[in-house]
Amino acid sequence: MLDLITRLFGIVLLRLGPQDLPANRATLLACIVLYLIITAINLASGNGHPKPVLLMTLAVVLPLILCWIVLNLRQRAGRWQQTVAALFGTSALLSVLTLPLTLSVGEGPSPVLGLLLLAGFFWSLAVDAHIWRHALDVAFSTGLLVAVILLSVSLFVISSLAGRV
């Protein structure tokens, strides 16, 4: 498990890619479970969500489906497990790193806190772009475009089906 977390940190630091993760079901499941745990903690620590089970289900199912579609369009379906594991694992790690900032939001708005959270959001987007760049064998800018489009689609579907995000 320590090796997996070390590799995920390498991806978060843009030094490794999804291809550096083991291509097996155990890694994929570990990353999804880690993501679910962190997401549940985030949901429980905030104001809550009226439909937390639906929200968490969509937060897992949508990336699985969207990743499969994008990789199949580029004829890279064999990279699905590693790509999805990288996306869920890095998202979980970044959520852990920004959790103290997220918890501090409830204490009152702060410009510095807002800037730190914004920086965390943009870093997360850069990490996703980095993962897509490697998974699709494209330029970083194309990976960023894919990441932004998939984030937009996910937010639209989740807000349409589960209400506020």
Image (tube, rainbow, N blue to C red):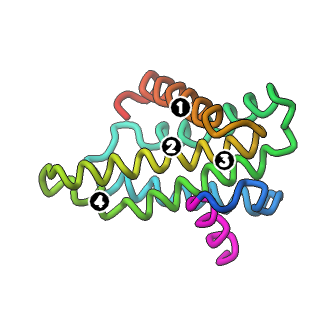
Q: Earlier in the sequence, mark 2 or mark 4?
A: 4
Q: Earlier in the sequence, mark 1 or mark 3?
A: 3
Tag 2 and tag 1, C-beta contact below 8 Å: yes
Element class at badge 4: helix
Give, as a three-letter code, the residue at label 1: Val
Distance between mark 1 and mark 3 Cα atoms? 13 Å
* Above-or-below relation of 125 to 73: below
Residue that mark 3 sits on: 131
Distance between mark 2 and mark 1 Cα atoms? 7 Å
Q: Earlier in the sequence, mark 4 or mark 1?
A: 4
Residue lying furthest bottom: 2
Residue 103 position within the rendered picture, expressed as x and y whole percent measured from the top left: 27, 59
Q: Earlier in the sequence, mark 2 or mark 1?
A: 2
Residue that mark 1 sits on: 148
Distance between mark 4 and mark 1 Cα atoms? 23 Å
Q: Residue at 69% of width from left, 37% of height from top?
A: 139
Residue 130 position within the rendered picture, expressed as x and y whole percent measured from the top left: 63, 47
Residue that mark 4 sits on: 101
| Nearer-the-camera pick, 33 or 91 | 91
Instruction: Identify the disc placed on residue 125.
Output: 2
Q: Main secondary structure of the magenta part?
A: helix
**Where are the magenta residues, as a range?**
1-13
* Above-or-below relation of 153 to 24: above
Residue 149 position within the rendered picture, expressed as x and y whole percent measured from the top left: 56, 27
| Nearer-the-camera pick, 139 or 44 | 139
Displayed quadrant of residue 68 = top right
